[in-house]
Image: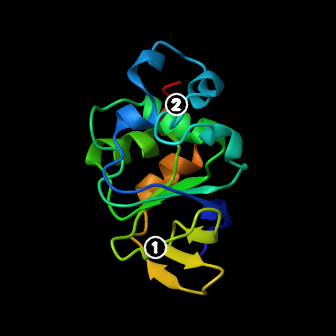
Amino acid sequence: MEDKDFLYRGGARVFGDNVDTDAIIPAQYLILAEEKEIAAHCMEEESPGFPTRVKPGDVLVAGENFGCGSSREHAPVAIRGCGIACVVAKSFSRLFYRNAVNIGLPVIAAPGLPPVSEGEEIAVDCVSGSIRLLKSGAEIAGSPLPPFMLEILRTGGLYGYLDQRLKAQGRL
């Protein structure tokens, strides 16, 4: 099944293993509320100037245990606010994974992900879980997102999903 809403293609922005939420968005910026303000500090210590290098539609690629640490929704908000279309990692912290889906940021776990070069063109299909590295032609099987998560993403996140459901039930 192919759903064009969940096909992404962009340059890879690469990080390693165990990137925690403090590295994604340092704690002193948790007082910020606007997505663009939060995004301006994304990966500030891990990769200075990261937000300025991201092109809209880029794909963040990481190793094991991405998003570990504290459960802060600011982390996926910062990533999305930079223009990242989706995140592919060998594995995710469970809390980060759900926070990302809840705010409308697609995430694909791909345990067999080979090394990816910074800026390498990557294509991701969230419905099938397929990941293609366009330079080498390598195709990796990631974990497809279940239909209910795709619906949450389609509506922009959990709030949009709940709003749609409540309206359909005549409760809003």
Alpha carbon of mark 1 to alpha carbon of mark 2: how far? 49 Å
Query: Which amino acid type is shown beneath numbered disc 2?
Result: Gly
Residue positioned 48% across, 26% down in the render: 171
The residue identified by callout 1 is 115
Say above or below: 112 vs 78. Answer: below
The residue identified by callout 2 is 170
Say above or below: 136 vs 26. Answer: below
Query: Which amino acid type is shown beneath numbered disc 1?
Result: Pro
The residue lying toward the viewer, choosing from 166 and 25, is 25
Picture coordinates of residue 153, whole percent (x, y): 53, 49
Picture coordinates of residue 145, whole percent (x, y): 43, 63
From the viewer's perspective, tell me whether residue 49 is left or right of residue 159.
Answer: right
Q: Nearer the viewer, mark 1 or mark 2?
A: 1
Label 2: element kind: loop
Q: Earlier in the sequence, mark 1 or mark 2?
A: 1
Residue positioned 30% across, 50% down in the render: 18
